[in-house]
Amino acid sequence: MRPSSIVDDALGLTMGTTGVLFEIHETVGIDYEIDALDDKRREIYITNMKESIERLEKFAIQFKDKTFTNWVKRYISFLKIDLEKQLYYEELSDKLRDKLFKNVKERKEQLQNENRRFENLLFEKNYNKLGLR
C-alpha cells in the first residue's frame, strides 16, 4: 500500500468536513422534530393553564375571602408572566434553530461545490500529467 499523498490528505480533509456538516444538518433536523412534539405538549399545557386560571378566578369570587382573592391574583399574574417568558424563549430557540439549519445547509452545499471543483482540478492535473490528453 502506498503512503498517502498531500492530495489524498486534502481530499480526506474536505470530505471529513463535509461529513461533519452533514451530521450537524441531520442533528438540527432531529431537533425540529423534538420541537414539534414540544409545541404540541405546550398547546395542551396552555389550554389547561387558561382553564385553571378561569377556575381560580371563579373560586376567588365564590369564596369572597380577601386573602384568598389576593393570592389568586398574584398566582395568576405569576402564571401569565411565566407563560409569556416560555413563549418568548421558545421563539428565540426557534429562530436560532432556523438560522443554524440555514447556515449549515448553505455551508454544506458550498463545501460540496468546492470539493467537486477541487476533485475535478486534481483529476484534470493527473490526467494531463499522465499525458492522456
Image (cartoon, helix red, strand yellow):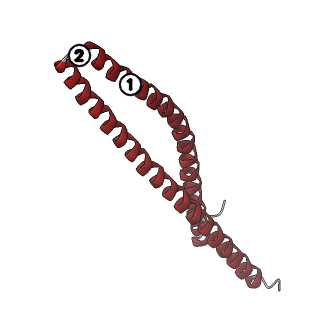
- Say which element carries label 1: helix
Q: Residue at x 20, y 25 (%)?
A: 70
Residue 18 horizontal/vertical position (percent):
59, 60
Q: Is residue 66 above or below residue 40?
A: above
Residue 14 relative to residue 42: left or right: right
Q: Which amino acid type corresponds to the residue marked 2 in the rendered image?
A: Lys
- Among all residues in the image, which is located at the extreme top? 63
Residue 31 horizontal/vertical position (percent):
52, 43
Q: Residue at x 30, y 39 (%)?
A: 81
Residue nearest the viewer, comparing 110 with 73: 73
Residue nearest the viewer, comparing 8 with 67: 67
Q: Residue at x 37, y 20 (%)?
A: 55
Q: Which amino acid type corresponds to the residue marked 1 in the rendered image?
A: Glu
Q: Which residue is mark 1?
A: 54
Q: Which residue is mark 2?
A: 64
Could you tell me which quadrant the C terminus lies in?
Answer: bottom right
Could you tell me which quadrant the N terminus lies in?
Answer: bottom right
